[in-house]
Image (cartoon, coloured by chain):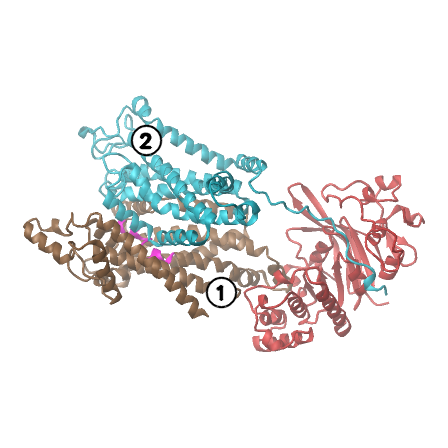
Amino acid sequence: MTAPLLEVQDLRTVFQTKEGIVKAVDGVSFELMPGETLGIVGESGCGKSVTAMSIMRLQRPGKIVGGKVLFKGQELTKMTEYEMREVRGKEIAMIFQDPMTSLNPVFRVGWQVSEPIRIHQGWDAKKSLASAVGMLGRVGIPSAATRARDYPHQFSGGMRQRAMIAMGLTTTPPVLIADEPTTALDVTIQAQILDLLRRVNNDFGTATILITHNLGVVAGMCERVLVMYAGKIVESGPTKDVFAHPKHPYTWSLLRSIPRLDADRHEPLKPIEGLPPHLVDLPPGCSFHPRCAFKVDRCMRDEPALLQVGETQKAACWVTQSGQELKGA
Amino acid sequence: MLAKYVARRLLASLVVVLGVTAITLGLMSSTRGSFVPGIDLNPALRPEDIERLKEQLGLNDPGYVWYGKWIWGVLHGDFGHSMIDGSTVWSHIADRLPNTLELTGTAIVIGVLFAIPFGIIGALRHGTKTDHSMTVVSVAGFAVPQFWMGLMLILLFSVTLEQHGLPWLPSSGAFSAVNGGDIGDRVVHLILPATVLSFFYISTWSRFIRSSMLEVMSQDYIRTARAKGMGERRVVYLHGLRNALIPLITLVGLELPGLVSGGLVVEVVFGWPGIGKLAFERALQYDYTTVMGVTFFATLLVIAGNLIADLLYGVFDPRIRYA
Amino acid sequence: MIGQSRVAELDMPTAAAEGAATRPAQSYWNESWERLSANRIGLAAGALIVVFAAIAIAAPLFSAVLTHFQPQSINLDITFKPPGAPNYLGTDELGRDTLTRIIWGGRVTLGVAFLTVAMSLTVGSSIGMLAGYYGKWVDDILMRIVDTVLAIPAIFLFILMSILFRPNAITLAAIIASVGWGGVARLVRGEVLSVKERDFILATRSIGARDFRLMLRHLLPNVLPVLIVSASLGVGQIILVEAALDFLGLGIQPPTPSWGNMLTNAESYFYHSFWLVIWPGIAIFATVLASNIFGNAVRDAFDPRLKSH
């Protein structure tokens, strides 16, 4: 068994707001293996993006108040800002949700894509630009040499996301974090970008953390998946198993709220009732219990830990941990 | 494309220039004829002399004829002669313009040089004591009358220092009449008026850059820049500032007409021999041609300032296209 | 691996779509008022203005009860007296009491400022509404006029008009307002255009007698916030312009005292009576400062979009 590339242990990130302290990431632990694609899925505001930003130490104005992030054995949360810069963009690259706003409007695309090489490898403008043009070509931008001289507003949304991906890959980092990379794009473009990410994973062996609220994307892309709810991981395991036999009622409800081809056509879709909890004022016990169809008394009192349930999965649920199956109501 | 845009803008400006000069003349002609410029300088003039003078200066023509002749002259590069001293209006402007440019140019440069770092510090230390105290100073900068600030500086740095036998700063003129005129002398004369003018610019622009910087620093592309692993200095000064400066261009461009008129009050307070003071004095003497000349010139600067600001916008913001 | 087509996007709860109101709802005014009431510094500044205005209005009372001097009563026996009872702020070259003159000067300065704001707003909002409402050639012509007015270096125009008209308080206000309305007109026109954009009835209005009523009943409430904000931000600037004109000898003429014209002969006081240069300036500074702070508070309260951080 190989050692994990990235290990997150009991990570906690809080935000100070007017209403109180928001525990955006509340004790998250997971591992990322070399070359694998890991999905993190959950509703908006469940803490999946903050988890990613915390790994990069870009969570400001939030504060990391506990836990460890081990990258190749180094503790990222203990690093100085200066040391951390050597990790960002060089060891761990990141691409963001909205390619429209994530590129700086006043600099040429080629210049921006080549910037990480200039910063980390210290190459001169000409050499780094040539390398950037090469990378732009590889991510499927036609006549890359010409387009590199364009400004971001001259690119379409899909092209910009390709450019963002190219920007992340110029330094061939071992880890790529993609935060909702396709959410802002058209459906056809989404498929192309996901295809590109898969290719990147194959060609460069880049381990990828794919953050999304789209279960379809996870199903198509990821070997393993983490399901987050209210700042915690509530279920984890191989994508296939989690989707086939969810061990947490939240995952179970998520899967039932979307259409499936293999299910009975006449069975109506069931949206999840209620709203995600306010992170300042979490319910006692399991955070999901107010929306849970399976809840027992204990769920309202005690908080379940993320424990092994079944052979390959982990879940934080009193019901499944006690051996019960989640069967449709 | 660009040439076409500029041409169209200039054409539209023509209407504005005509409007402005017509309004100026219209205002002045309400007294035309009843008052002959320069007459009080020579009390010995007989009525027939005055009549001859009026004829000579064209004051007996109806307003539109006078205006027509004036426009005709301007089209031929002739702004006419001063009604007071007979020398050409252009020579007056050429005489005073360098002084005005020296004062307002210095103030604008100082304004930009101080406003940018102040604005950045205010944005980066948003909400701290440093930020609050800079806010207080700039709010005060908006509220203090320029002429009074000038008077206070004169009181402090010229009068009081002189009374205590200390070296003091000159309070009037652009250079010493006696043994003056070298660079050092001009700089010493420049200190007080340039301080007053630039204080105002710094107050205005630093607030502006602060809020512009605050907005820019919360943009997604700043997060992207940080994620690339560059130093915060590069994030702020390259990726942030480059965007935050774009709106400043408009502000500075709009200040171009201030090159002529913005410093008027300061020029009067400090006896600065500039264009603004010229216009003020000549207006008091009903020197129509000189006032028309300066107004025309100042209006051209307003238009040029707007146009240059728009064009610079295009240089600094690649998203702008001129159609 | 599970086929991608099997599952689609999650159904996420979304915020209710924003309804486009045709006029600011009652709650808008309540919320704005609440925001303003919560701004203590802004309220204090507003209170200060009210105090200044009250003092100005009650100037004759102050003359009779507090200072026992009249603003224009000359007494050559007590010229250039330093501050001290009974002339708490000293006297000037004609032995006039400075405190009394400052109190009376405030009457003029504040009066002119408020009058100017009223004039600029009335003219500016009328022109702006006409231009925005009728559009087409009406808009073209009116806005070209606005461009022209705003392109004249304002200080030249003020000087010219002041020289020609030798103003009193009312004409001085008219002179300053003759430029001030341009900016208001532009603002109001913009606001009207955006209301038209939102409002179906207004966009497809029937022509005729209903126009005027529509403008008054429908548009005015919509542009009111803009007017309130621009009025409260304008007062300070107008006081500065007026003071400068008075200082240059072009505004309110002596012997009527105004804060600006009390400084006209400042150079001749420097060497022996510098307090004469200090008090009027402080009066202007304090008033403009209070107006600006209050103006900013009003803007933040009524137009959160424009809020400066």
Q: Identify the residue shown where x is 19% and y is 62%.
A: B88
Q: Colour of chain B?
A: brown
Mark 1 element type: helix
Q: Camera-side residue: B156 or C98?
A: C98
**Residue B92 seen in the figure:** no
In the rendered structure, find residue C103 and report the number of the disc placed on it.
2
Q: Amino acid at mark 2?
A: Ile
Q: CA distance from mark 2 to mark 1?
A: 51 Å
B258 magenta-colored: yes
Chain of the residue displaying label 2 = C
Farthest-out residue, top: C65
Q: Splitting the image into 4 quarters, where does residue C80 fall?
A: top left
Task: Report the predominant secondary structure element of the magenta stretch.
Answer: helix
Measured as percent of width and height from the top left, residue C244 is found at 31, 44
Chain of the residue displaying label 1 = B
Q: Which chain is cyan?
A: C
C280 over A29 or under it: above or below: above
Q: Splitting the image into 4 quarters, where does residue C116 fall?
A: top left
Q: What is the magenta range?
A: B255-268
Q: Identify the residue shown where x is 27% and y is 52%.
A: B24
Measured as percent of width and height from the top left, residue A27 is found at 77, 51
A105 over B197 or under it: above or below: below
Q: Identify the residue shown where x is 67% and y is 70%.
A: A166
**In-image side of A5 versus B231 (left or right):** right
Measured as percent of width and height from the top left, residue C75 is found at 19, 28
A46 over A205 or under it: above or below: above
Q: Camera-side residue: A50 or A251?
A: A251
Which residue position holds label 1?
B316
Answer few, some or many: residues within 10 Å of disc 2's Cα (few below 14, many 20 plus, some between 14 and 19). many
Q: Camera-side residue: C95 or A288?
A: A288
Q: Which chain is red?
A: A
